[in-house]
Amino acid sequence: MSLNLFKLDGRIALVTGSGQGIGLAMAEGLAAAGAHVVLNGRDKTKLEAAQGAIAAAGHKVSIAPFDVTDQKAVEAGVAAIEAEIGPIGILINNAGTQKRGAFVDFPAEDWHFLVATNLHSVFYVTQAVAKRMAPRNRGKIVSIGSVMSKLGRPTIVPYTATKGAVALMTQGLAAELGKHNIQVNAIGPGYIVTELNKALIADETFSNWVKSRTPVGRWGETRELIGAAIFLSSEASDYVSGHLLMVDGGLTSVV
Ligand code: GCO
């Protein structure tokens, strides 16, 4: 039965930044598809609340609170997951943040914070996980890009730089890890209703622009990213690698 291609039973999935928002939605979706999800973030209380909800739904879930911008903490966290829970078969690099402001006035410390959170994290976590996946000759790595992996808009140049890098890093990793049967892809969310976008949603002019600029005419919901996450985490995508799958209501396909 072809739907079995999307089942994740027996797989352990680490989802970074999964205490809330897109990361939590994807973790819930992967758990419902059968994976044992490992929730990551810096806020243990948030992770425990998310863990309670997923466990209450009858799914397998653990937490691994570590800072994805700290290479030593990442290495120790990944080693502990593999020692205490089992081999990570699926990595979702979701952790990320946003800071907006005019480029000419953008504080260097904010640039460094965005690069650390959105990009160093992908390097540290992917390296710690991929070096363990490679000898097993099997793995799925999915990073969260953005419409800003392909397009720019004023006031978010640093964020755009990090999301563009995530897209090309995905292609480079696909090239290098393919021989280990590790498929590496990215998801490009459109304008999704999340905490990070609260200010944009509250701005009627901007929100109306998103609705007019997006062919489906609305903001997306975090649950609408689950299908892409399950697909790219499952054997249904064993011949898909280096791909940036846009989940953006058509935004990046139109002028
Ligand atoms: C912005 C938004 C976007 C979205 C998302 C789109 O300021 O334009 O934060 O960057 O959050 O990244 O894919």
Image (cartoon, helix red, strand yellow):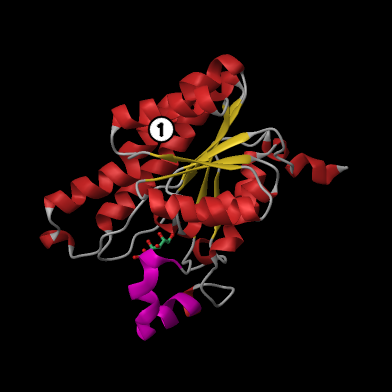
Outermost residue to the right: 1
The N terminus is located in which quarter?
Answer: top right
Apparent side of residue 245 relative to residue 143 in the rendered image (left or right): right
Quarter of the rendering containing residue 165: top left
Residue 100, compared with residue 149, is above or below; it is below
The local crowd at label 1, few if under 14, some if 14 to 19, many if 20 or more residues have their Cα within 10 Å, is many
Residue 30, compared with residue 213, is above or below; it is above
Spot occupied by residue 76 in the image (x, y as percentages of width and height): 37, 26
Outermost residue to the bottom: 204
What residue is shown at x 35% (from left), y 38% (from top)?
Answer: 121
Quarter of the rendering containing residue 204: bottom left
What residue is shown at x 47% (from left), y 69% (from top)?
Answer: 193
Q: Which residues are magenta?
A: 194-211
What residue is shown at x 27% (from left), y 66% (from top)?
Answer: 154
Spot occupied by residue 17 in the image (x, y as percentages of width and height): 42, 48
Spot occupied by residue 59 in the image (x, y as percentages of width and height): 66, 47
- Main secondary structure found in the magenta portion: helix
Residue 10, compared with residue 58, is above or below; it is above
Spot occupied by residue 161 in the image (x, y as percentages of width and height): 30, 49
Is 196 magenta? The answer is yes
Q: Is mark 1 within 8 Å of ligand 1?
A: no
Residue type at numbered disc 1: Val
Q: Which residue is mark 1?
A: 125
Front residue of this view, candidates 179 and 58 = 58
Can the viewer see residue 52? yes
Quarter of the rendering containing residue 20: bottom left
Is 86 magenta? The answer is no
Front residue of this view, candidates 35 and 212 = 35
Quadrant location of ligand 1?
bottom left
